Image (spheres, coloured by chain):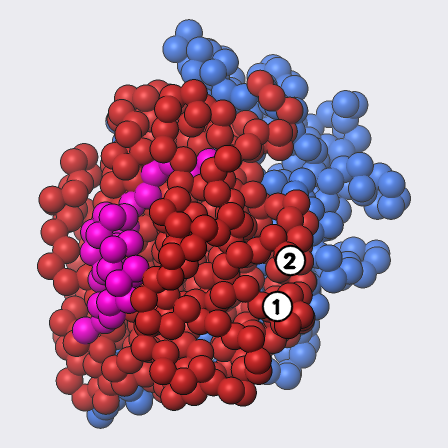
Chain colours: A blue, B red
Amino acid sequence: MSTAIAEAAADRPTLAVLPLAVTAVGVATPAGLGLEALGRAVAEGLTGHPEALPGDETPPPRPVRTVPDLRTEELIGRKGVRHLDRTTRLGLVACRLALDAQPDPVGERTGVVLGTSTGSIRSSSEYSMETLRQERPYLVNPSLFPNTVMNCAAGQIAIRHGLRGVNATLAGGHLAGVQALRYARNALRQGHADRLLVGGVEEFSPQGAWGWHLSGALDPQAPVGEGAAVLVVEPQDAALAAGRTALARVLACETGFAPRERLAEGLASVIAAALRRSGKDPAEVTTVSLGCTGRTGLDRVEESALGLALGGALPGQVVRVKETVGECFSADGVLQIAAVLGVWQHEGRTHGGTAVVTSVSGDGLVGCAVLDTAGSPG
Amino acid sequence: MPEPGTRRVAITGLGAVSSAGIGAAEFTASIRAGRRTTSPISGFDTTGFPHTHAGEVHDFDPAAWLRRIEPARWGRSSQFAASAARLAVADADLTESALAGARSGSVMGTTSGESAVIEELVSAWAADGLKSLDGSRVGAVPAGRIAAAVNSELGLSGEALTLATACSASNYALGYAYDMVASGEADYMLAGGADSLNRWAHAGFYRLGALAEEICRPFDADRAGILTAEGGVALLVEPYDRAVARGARIYAEVLGYSVNCDAEHMVHPDPGSIASCIRAAHRSAGVTPEDIDYICAHGTGTRTNDATEVAAAREVFGDRIPPISSIKSMIGHTMGAASGFGALICCMALYEGFLPPTAGVENVDPALGAGVDPVAGVARPASPRVVQNHGFAFGGNNAITILGRAS
């Protein structure tokens, strides 16, 4: 680590983090439904489902990854689903899977912290389009209006499961995962909920895919994907007291901001701070889970930051979830975490794993989450 | 480093970009006078819309306010947020280097993010198909750009968080900023929100029957609904002791806040759930209902909102509901910025000594029951000590902040 980075890290607060226990995971990805499918696909290097979804608009000529069979009605019922958009359906399915993976029901003092970037860009842009195409601009369908609001999915999740704790939607894009966990830790500490569903969701849409295609932000062969991932978290002490087994612990979640030309140093600095606050030495890191795979220019920034912060080469286990699921934007962060948990589960690792999960946005946001196998000492 | 949660938290800088003016002083003077600043929409083509009024920020020139970021690379909401933040920092009498040299970040709320950018792209899609989208403009779409704009404009290296909890998002943001400063995670936080006018929301609210034709009249028997609006607002939040030490003007102390979720219905708020949010906010602030001197209402101007909000207040305050007014009667519903503007006017009310008015109330709706005082007309001189700021949102996302006069 360079001296400047060490100094920048030393300037950060040294408050101990409140470790969070992850007690269940629910994922809907191009590898299929459930953590096992994701873990197997990532561990074995399988690519996810490549079909484009039906619709009027043709997606751009580039690779695509979509969730093959969402089983919405089977998992969340038929009632009231007709007007829900794919973002909300993905979120509801991932939550259902997470809650089904819990042995006990969660109470109403549970909340939701969900990451997004724009909500469903398909829903909002199609709604806007209707104001141009209809005979009168106001002849839009009022029952589709809720889909245009970014906190639609979080609200629906709360209603379906009676979750009356904090209900927050974070527009973090690529940073949404680490931001959501950071937000969740604070909300639990402040007593705004006892347990939280922390997730990220991104639907595939022709509108979004054309946006990626034309922006030049993705390498030509990088697939545009979709997915949702939800973690059930609570303070580790509470999980222990209730006898709930943790799949892993979330330690520090640090975020920062750097100008474009100093993104690598900015990211290295938050990685260093996150490790320090987690009580982890860089040498203990067994796994990194990358967020910039396929993102033009930023993949090198991310690897160089990890090199700076970890003191040289990457550790033995490098998880590139996007090779399986494609570019999933605001679902990336939680999917990166889910992929680590899925791979650890796949290889039967319950002790001694420490993972660094990194996120970068081209706008200057940088973030890092640290997790470990719950069986680790300390 | 102090123990978590032990630092008191002050608001020392205010910035506003609104239909009621740019800068906290202009905004406050307009509100105190009870001036209605909604107007015919010019930001988008209103042909064919029966209702064409909104709280629009006319003639906003971002280049006049922004020094570092290039306005053309950002959307309108980001421009509003960064300008408001720049104004708040100047108002707090902080140098750029003092702010950027500390652990400083931003947390901004929004409902529709960069909706105006999305509509720009939709126009291109309508004209020539999705393949004709401007790739460089696509980069301005993510709503998270709003907080990123604040950090970029001010050179901040701390977190940049955009909360998209719709119309209570700014109160969520202020609560989060309070926690970060109180716990020692951050030294300075800019908290607020921003949103832009857009056709799709105008159409959607009209179709829901919630849009007023020309006048937003909360608490009045003849109310007709909301007016959509836009703007950006930012509050500079810092440790109380540091504010005192640097001789800063302290507008207010953040005493506490609460957030919860109805978990009942996407668009119909629930009075019982709001009442528990109020009680939890009081507990967080260490106050009782008797301590509250004023409520800055969510007050959208719909019958449902008024009935729900007053019922919730009655459940907590009994028959002694504090004066409760809505600044949306003057500036319309600025969506994700709304509770930020509410917090700003609460700060000024505590600092200057007045109660903000509800404009245009002629006949308080008797259906709301006895004892509802909406501070009709113009501001009322008063010396509030503790005030309560409401933000309720789509999705049942309630957030309430409690602010106190500087001691």
Q: Secondary structure at mark 1?
A: loop
- Please report, as a chain letter, where disc 1 is located: B
Dividing the picture into quadrants, the one containing residue B243 is top left
Q: What residue do we see at 21% from left, 81% from top?
A: B52
Residue B63: quadrant of the picture:
top left
Residue A88 screen position, x and y as percent? 53, 68
Residue A47 visible in rendering:
no
Instruction: Look at mark 2 in the image and give the residue it sits on.
Output: B289
Above or below, comparing residue B346 to residue A273 in the picture: below
Say which element carries label 2.
helix
Q: Is residue A23 visible in the rendered structure shown here?
A: yes
A7 to B100, vertically: above or below: above
Query: Is disc 1 surrounded by few (<14), some (14 to 19) or many (20+) residues within 10 Å?
Result: some
Residue at the bottom extreme of this rendering: A135
Tell me the distance, in whole angstroms, between the alpha carbons under discs 1 and 2.
9 Å
* Number of numbered callouts drawn: 2
Confirm or deny contact between disc 1 and disc 2 (CB under 8 A).
yes
Start-end of magenta stretch: B10-39
Location of residue B163 in the rendering, given as x and y in whole percent from the top left corner: 45, 52
Q: Is residue A138 above or below residue B359?
A: below
Residue B188: image location, x then y, percent? 42, 31
Residue that carries the numbered disc 1 in the rendered image: B320
Give the left or right position of residue A308, taking residue B155 as reference.
Answer: right
Please state the chain letter of the residue tagged with numbered disc 2 in the rendered image: B
Q: Amino acid at mark 1?
A: Arg
Q: Residue at x 15, y 48 (%)?
A: B62
